[in-house]
Amino acid sequence: MDIEINEKILGQLEVVFNEILAAYTKMADLYEVKKHALIKMDSEILKESDDNILEQNNILIDLNNERLRIIKQLGKEEMTVSEIIEEAEKIESPLTDYFKEFKVKINEVSKRIMLLEQTNVELIHQGLTMSNKILDIILQACTPQSGGYDCHGKNSQGEGPGVSSICEDA
């Protein structure tokens, strides 16, 4: 394939990669907001952050589709960033350094997102555990304690050894 065409395609990839990096960085920021909402147990902010995360995910899907469309112009179905770097080095593209920096930055952002996701899962797990304990306490408080009453409906736990009505009649 012509070197000029490859350079043009690499330029298109650079534009898309800039948008991808910005989108992943925003995604990491949204996960950070979600983490703080989980800590503060603020359901409004949590719902808003979840909605924003879903919206950002749709943007990332569109950007990935655009990336794949551009890569198909190189005659390939899929290429990793490392393969793109190799292609740029073959034609001695000035964008080679950009793609190397991109690879480092996207790895840093993806590690940050992964750690935030793990933290958020742990916070959700802790929140569910706390909710279950609170629910158990509420249920125990609302449930009548039938074992503590005798057949006449009197509290039998607070009294000492009692005499049954049969013994009293005798």
Image: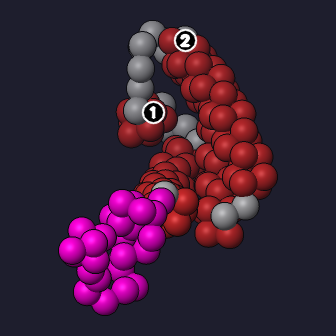
Quarter occupied by residue 111: bottom left
Residue farthest along the bottom direction in this orientation: 160
Residue 170 spot, x, y in % from top left: 21, 74
Please indicate, yes or no, whether residue 8 appears anywhere in the rendered image: no
| C-alpha separation, residue under disc 2 versus residue under disc 1 | 13 Å
The image's mark for residue 102 is none
Percent position (x, y) of residue 3?
A: 54, 21
Residue plotted at (31% across, 89% down): 160
Q: Label 2 sits on what residue type?
A: Gln
Determine crowd level at label 1: few under 14, some 14-19, many 20+ residues with C-alpha closer than 10 A: some
- 78 vs 152: above or below: above
- Residue matched to label 1: 84
Q: Which residue is mark 2?
A: 73
Q: Quadrant of residue 39?
A: bottom right
Q: Residue at x 48, y 57 (%)?
A: 143
Q: Residue 20: x and y, percent? A: 63, 39
Q: Amino acid at mark 1?
A: Ile
Q: Which residues are magenta?
A: 144-170
Above or below residue 1? Residue 166 is: below
Foreground residue among 6 and 119: 119
Q: Is residue 161 left or right of residue 4?
A: left
The residue at 40%/32% (across/down) is 80
Q: Is residue 152 visible?
A: yes
- Front residue of 65 and 155: 155
Tell me the chief SS of the magenta region: loop
